[in-house]
Amino acid sequence: MTRCAAITICATFLLAGLCPTPVRAGDEPFTGPSNYGLTGLLETPTARVMPENRFRLGATQVHPYRYYYGSIGLFERLEVSGRITEVIGVPAFSDVSGSSYGNTKDKAFDIKLQLLKEGKYLPAFSLVISDPTGTSLYASQSVVASKQIYPFDFSLGMGNGRFGKKPLPPAGEGFNLQIFTNPSAWWQDAQLFGGVQFTPVDWLTLMAEYSPIRYDLQTQDPAQPKYFQNPVPSKINAGLRIRPARWAELDLSWQRGQEIAVGASFSFDIGRPLLPIYDRPYREPERLRRDPLADRIAAALHGTGFSDIGVEADGFTLRVDAENNRYFFTPRAVEVILDGIAPLIPPGYEYVRIRIKENGNPVTEFITTGPALAELREGRISPGRLFALSTFRSDGIGPPVPDTVERRRYDYGVRPSFEAFLNDPARFVSYRLGIAAWVEGYTWRGGTAAFEVEGYPLNTVTTANQPLSIPVRSDIALYKQQNVSVGQLLFDQLLTTDSQLYARAAVGLLEIEYAGVDGEVALPLSRGRWVVGVGGSLVQKRDPDNVFGLVGDKWYTPVFFNGRLNVPEANLAFGVQAGRFLAGDWGARFSVAKYIHGVKLSAWYSATDTSIFSDPYNHGYHDKGIAVEIPIRLFLGHDSRTSYSISLSPWTRDVGQDIVHYRTLAEFISRYSEISLDRDAESLYKGKR
């Protein structure tokens, strides 16, 4: 950077800080994406962050790079972005026979933490960590400040690596964080960057920046040998950003003094339904109004999505048992029950106790008073106020009402199924798209027979990799490349006790690759704040070409201690799975999940003893990945308990692997824990008390 340019940027930024002009709340409207997805200008980041729980998908092309990205405001002040960088015209794996991988592609993630929010005089200040692990082709660590004098927003930062005087070395399975581990080296390598945004109207932003990137010195960049033998003509980039809608942004810019760049991104609020959710209220037919109270309640609940209904009344307490078949959130299911029974209950009942069941097992009880329910019926209190006056409990709720009606014996369905696998030498993206049909039979209390068959008319799954030294998952392509397969054929038994000890066991074809026996025992503590337990499996590999066949005589015996910490106040859960994994490697897998209006975002990381593996791919490796689970209710316009999940993780590694479980007790128990139900009720009826 020239001395003149540095003095100009610093002087402009100082002037911005000395002007206490009124600003807009938060970082809006300066939260558009940079080339690679993280909130910023074009090539450089700003101190701005996306709003919490907002998600963005987009792509940018500025020759020779093509970026595909997804970014999320994970928490207030914390933004996380994942990206794929494609280098146009630079092929990868050209030495692999039959490979259709195409251009070189690199996966990376970036994190931005806003350490200081903007004030009247002080700027917003953020720490940016880019591509800290793996190949670290585009790694950097930066600090950046942003100050707005609306409609202008000024940014100034310093960064090493990609923005510095020399590229950072590969991090491998570790993390390259020079800004923390060697601050003096970071300072010596770091260079200034900065820019300004101008928003004359809400739908238009003009941008200009100084980018210090020395493309000709980025020797780790696959693009450098072919495209950047000499310095680029200019370090000044300029462009415009158009917002035709709140959820869409289009970028057009001139970068490096030689390239036109175009980009588009789309953003939305996580968990917000695309269609308003409406469930038709129950209206009792005239012909039922002379029936006994228990029959009238059973008809009301069955008509609104419940089954296995039991009613007991002694004139003082009314007990209602029901299985929730429709409503994603348990407090919402309880509200529907209350709406259905409130007009039917005669005077004199002091307490109403509602137990929600799972396949005949009571899992939680809602306790309220008759007078409070009467006030709800008459409109004197809101549902939110009723929940505040009432309580959920999950221990000591007793056995279910013995005499029930509308018992559900089976269920079935069809769902779309899409799986994608990235970065195999054969092709960058392998996928399969089809449908999965399933049927479940409910034999007795807690017993479930499950069958699922999958069909994929579009299936490109293949691999150029050979199974590794202990192939417990590195041979998964043999199973995924089948166009038709039986995903599950098993029997699962769930047991509960009044002291909240839970147990489950499953036997059969447990998942696409393994068959055998799987079991678990767990116990919630402190109202469900903690869940602890042990589990294990005894499995053999299935034959991918024979539905009921097994391969060899080798048995796999993963066994674990399972622990989970629920923090519903922050919509978070932390998990640990410690013990022996499928391949025999001992260690632990750590996970974190965030829940946003029913959407579950999760990530995991394993640390195990990989010395048992003789191949270089597993040795020293840490299994890692991300997943999202999306309730289908967001797209239907009515409530549903069904969710679809998608995960991204390496599929040709054997470290830190477990079988796919029909259900896990930690998740099941946590869903019905008292602290989680209280939080769900608070979130659903926030502002309605």
Image: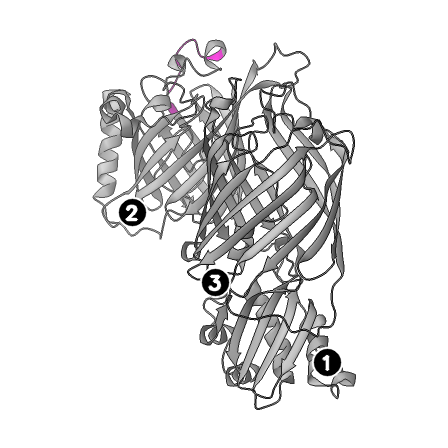
**In the picture, which quadrant includes the C terminus?**
bottom left
Secondary structure at badge 3 equals helix
Pointer 1: residues within 10 angstroms few (<14), some, or many (20+)? some
Q: Main secondary structure of the magenta part?
A: loop
Residue at point 62% right, 89% down? 346
Say which residue label 1 marks. Answer: 295
Depth check, mark 3 against mark 1: the one in front is 1
Say which residue label 3 marks. Answer: 683
Q: Is residue 259 magenta?
A: no
Secondary structure at badge 2 equals loop
Whether residue 366 sits left or right of residue 120 in the image: it is right
Identity of the amino acid at label 1?
Asp
Q: Would you place residue 609 above or below residue 588 in this image?
A: above
Whether residue 495 sits left or right of residue 157 in the image: it is right
Pointer 3: residues within 10 angstroms few (<14), some, or many (20+)? few
Here the colouring is one colour
Residue range (magenta)? 227-236
**In the picture, which quadrant includes the N terminus?**
top left
Quote the CA–CA distance across marks 2 and 1: 61 Å
Quote the CA–CA distance across marks 3 and 1: 33 Å
Q: Would you place residue 78 above or below residue 298 in this image?
A: above
Identity of the amino acid at label 3?
Ser
N-terminal-most mark, 3 or 1: 1
Identity of the amino acid at label 2?
Glu
Q: Position of residue 629 (x, y in %)?
A: 58, 47
Q: Position of residue 200 (x, y in %)?
A: 41, 44
